[in-house]
Image (cartoon, rainbow, N blue to C red):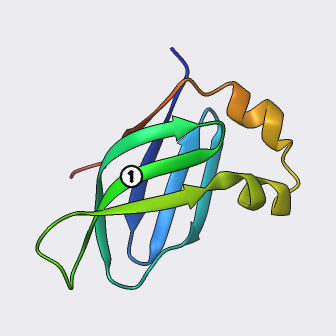
Amino acid sequence: MNYATLSSEKNYTIFKFNHYVIRFKAAYSLEYYSSVKEWNHGYLVVMAKYCHNIEDEEEYIDLIPILENLYIDADYFVNQIEEVRVHYDRH
């Protein structure tokens, strides 16, 4: 199955698929992503934990403009991804 992973580190969101590691700015108050609710051709609906709220909040990420700004063929890229999972490397 072709899946991508989503995580965060400091003030960045990290999206990984195959050999691509795409990092982009996240909200300063983001602590972590807890789940992916929906993946729809480059559009993500996720649950995220922010430091100013006890409860997780629904968040939206549109990867298409990010991919286009990186000169990545967005349609080809997202069509390969069947699922996105939250994954954190814990040491």
Q: Which is more toward the observer, 80 or 10?
A: 80
Name the residue at 33% across, 83% down: 29
The spot of residue 17 in percent (x, y) is 59, 37
Secondary structure type for disc 1? strand
* x, y percent for residue 73: 86, 42
Residue 2 relative to residue 30: left or right: right
Residue 59's image quarter? bottom left
Residue 11 vertical position relative to residue 84 in the rendered view, above or below: below
Q: Is residue 19 visible?
A: yes
- Where residue 78 sits: x, y (%)? 69, 35
Q: Residues within 10 Å of mark 1 (few under 14, many from 20)?
A: many
What residue type is disc 1 on?
Val
Horizontal relation, residue 17 to residue 46: left or right: right
Quick check: 56 left or right of 4?
Answer: left
Instruction: Please identify the residue farthest to the top as the structure is shown.
Output: 1
In the image, 9 versus 49, the foreground residue is 49
